[in-house]
């Protein structure tokens, strides 16, 4: 039974073996792609049922920060999982070797993990066992999340199970799983990366329980630059933490850039790559090239294939955290094999001779750069004619949650115009007898790789005589996180204070070409509040867009003055980036041309 092999794959070397099966490095014959294959031979039908259920719960998960499942097959001889072979080592191996990581490297690992967790949260899955053994660091410093062996649907309560050193208070209480549970575990690992020790010591299960549920948050032991993140992530109550991994990633991005500059992430990847290079002998492909016996290389490759692979490898302690999931409320620590599953759909049933989940060629997709495109609005809304309306949307974002956030931000100006036109029509006197025509005309400025900028013009033909022009609205979006950027994200804090605004006005004044319109639109002095949305004055109304906002183009920053119903429907000055860069945040300045 142990020697059963999948048709279409050539075994190159065995990486580990244990009581549940074996792990091999193999080559997919049709594509030539190297893969990790985990062969499971456990005869327990209940175990196989759990294994299938795990695959089902994770269907649709496909993200560059999560190890990729290519194929899962059950046959009478056993079961096999074919997955991406990661040329790297586990974060546990790095910490065992080095003790700590530089803050930029630790932040880079945490961000990658949060994006992977965010992808899981977006399909309703909570990992519940995030730990150093379940994070793989590749040769280029990038990281991937593995092992969803005890994952649950968000909001579902399960057994009290996990790894005690990283379990959130609500997890100890057996409460329903939530994304903030994973945020807590990720923060525990981050703390360990920057301090060399776990946030709470414990020799017994009860000691861990007491510390995680009532112990003081040890953020003071971490470097000052990351203490606020640790306080947030280790809050005892879920409501005190960021609600999900992507929200925490946004906070991390801001804190890291403010402390270490805009290049913090690339610096972190470089340092991680250097650290991983010190353990290059453990890389699966290095072991293949050297033709060595399984040994330590097999242990590391077992981790690369996932937690379940580590369990199958048996003694992969250094690289996989002993390959065990400690099940609380049980007499002993237990071992559970887990799929590293993405995008799986069950075909067949437990009674068939073979079950194949999403069988396809295991070829790793190339990353696609996110790009903003325009589309026509095709929905019908009573009282409005939107046949000439256009809107901006994004393509090429692998993370579904981030793509949804970007699309929401890009569609917001048209949505704002639709709601306002509906309100105007409802108040028309005499009542409308024909639809209002709203022609939204978005213009795309800078279009990636990290920053996107779009300006909306919203010309309208009203159902009744009305001298009212909608403003132009600028939208700036971070394509990595999906965050809609406000003036506070674009301008340095000192720029938005009195002296900084005076400097900005002086630079604008040097480019005036329409003095009369400039006098009407540009009030002196510039006011902080003009750069932010106004508070709604009436119940049921929406805030007005900022009176002053930036639009980033290839030729410079267009500073726009526009306000609905005002004497200044639109006025703009273009400032060359050489004149404005010092007034912008380092994150924005780094994305601009020239």
Image (cartoon, rainbow, N blue to C red):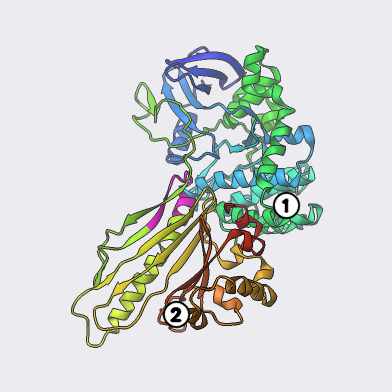
Check contact, mark 2 vs mark 1: CB within 8 A: no
Q: Is residue 262 left or right of residue 340?
A: right
Which residue carries the number 1 mark?
A: 260
Helix, strand, or loop for circle 1?
helix
* Along the viewing direction, whichever of 185 and 492 lies nearer the viewer: 492
Q: Is residue 435 left or right of residue 172?
A: left
Helix, strand, or loop for circle 2?
loop
* Along the viewing direction, whichever of 249 and 18 lies nearer the viewer: 249
Residues rendered magenta in the picture:
392-405
Q: Nearer the viewer, mark 2 or mark 1?
A: 2
Where in the figure is residue 280, as x and y percent of width and height?
70, 25
Indicate which disc, 2 or 1, sits on the residue closer to the N terminus. 1
Q: Please tell me in which quadrant of the rendered image residue 343 appears.
A: top left
* Along the viewing direction, whichever of 315 and 557 lies nearer the viewer: 557
Where in the figure is residue 111, as x and y percent of width and height?
62, 47
Is residue 68 on the magenta stretch?
A: no
Q: Does 22 appear above or below 527?
A: above
Q: CA distance from mark 2 to mark 1?
A: 41 Å
* Along the viewing direction, whichever of 408 and 332 lies nearer the viewer: 408
Q: Residue at x 38, y 67 (%)?
A: 457
Where in the figure is residue 512, as x and y percent of width and height?
53, 73
Which residue carries the number 2 mark?
A: 568
Where in the figure is residue 367, as x and y percent of width and height?
49, 38
Q: Does 25 appear above or below 544?
A: above
């Amino acid at each position: 039974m142990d020697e059963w092999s999948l048709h279409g794959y050539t075994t190159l070397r065995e990486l580990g073996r244990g009581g549940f099966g074996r792990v091999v490095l193999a080559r997919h014959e049709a594509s030539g792609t190297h893969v990790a294959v985990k062969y499971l031979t456990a005869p327990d039908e209940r175990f196989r049922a759990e294994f299938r259920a795990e695959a089902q719960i994770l269907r649709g998960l496909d993200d560059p920060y999560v190890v990729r499942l290519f194929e899962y097959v059950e046959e009478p001889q056993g079961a096999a999982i074919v997955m991406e072979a990661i040329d790297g080592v586990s974060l546990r191996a790095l910490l065992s070797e080095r003790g700590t990581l530089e803050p930029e490297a630790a932040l880079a690992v945490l961000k990658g993990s949060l994006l992977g967790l965010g992808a899981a949260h977006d399909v309703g899955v909570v990992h519940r066992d995030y730990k150093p053994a379940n994070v793989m660091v590749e040769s280029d410093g990038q990281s991937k999340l593995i092992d969803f062996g005890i994952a649950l649907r968000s909001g579902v309560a399960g057994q009290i199970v996990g790894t005690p050193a990283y379990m959130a208070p609500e997890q100890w209480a057996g409460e329903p799983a939530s994304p903030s549970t994973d945020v807590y575990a990720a923060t525990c690992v981050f703390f360990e990366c920057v301090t060399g020790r776990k946030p709470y010591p414990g020799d017994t299960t009860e000691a861990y329980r007491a510390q995680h549920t009532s112990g003081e948050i040890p953020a003071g032991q971490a470097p000052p630059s990351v203490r606020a993140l640790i306080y947030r992530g280790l809050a005892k109550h879920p409501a005190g933490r960021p609600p999900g991994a992507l929200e925490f990633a946004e906070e991390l991005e801001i804190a890291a850039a403010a402390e270490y500059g805009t290049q913090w992430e690339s610096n972190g990847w470089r340092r991680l790559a250097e650290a991983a290079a010190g353990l290059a002998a453990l890389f699966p492909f290095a072991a293949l090239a050297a033709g060595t016996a399984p040994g330590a290389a097999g242990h590391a490759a077992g981790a690369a294939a996932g937690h379940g692979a580590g369990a199958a490898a048996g003694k992969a302690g250094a690289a996989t955290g002993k390959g065990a999931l400690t099940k609380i409320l049980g007499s002993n620590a237990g071992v559970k094999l887990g799929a590293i599953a993405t995008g799986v759909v069950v075909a067949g049933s437990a009674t068939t001779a073979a079950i194949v989940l999403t069988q396809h060629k295991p070829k790793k997709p190339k990353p696609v750069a996110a790009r903003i495109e325009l589309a026509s609005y095709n929905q019908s809304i009573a009282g409005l004619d939107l046949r000439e309306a256009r809107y901006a949307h994004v393509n090429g974002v692998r993370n579904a949650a981030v793509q949804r956030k970007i699309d929401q931000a890009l569609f917001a100006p048209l949505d704002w115009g639709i709601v306002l036109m509906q309100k105007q029509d409802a108040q028309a006197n005499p009542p409308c007898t024909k639809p209002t025509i709203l022609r939204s005309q978005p213009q795309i400025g800078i279009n990636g790789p990290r920053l996107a900028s779009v300006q909306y013009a919203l010309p309208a033909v009203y159902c009744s005589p009305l001298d009212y022009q909608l403003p132009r609205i600028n939208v700036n979006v971070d394509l990595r996180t999906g965050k809609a950027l406000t003036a506070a994200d674009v301008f340095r804090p000192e720029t938005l204070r009195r002296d900084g605004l005076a400097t900005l006005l002086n630079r604008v004044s040097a480019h005036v070409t329409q003095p009369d319109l400039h006098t009407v639109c540009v009030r002196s002095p510039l006011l902080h509040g003009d750069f932010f949305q106004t508070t709604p004055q009436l119940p049921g109304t929406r805030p007005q867009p900022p009176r002053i906002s930036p639009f980033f183009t290839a030729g410079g920053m267009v500073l726009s003055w526009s306000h609905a119903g005002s004497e200044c429907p639109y006025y703009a000055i273009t400032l060359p980036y050489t004149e404005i860069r010092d007034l912008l945040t380092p994150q924005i300045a780094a994305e601009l041309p020239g």
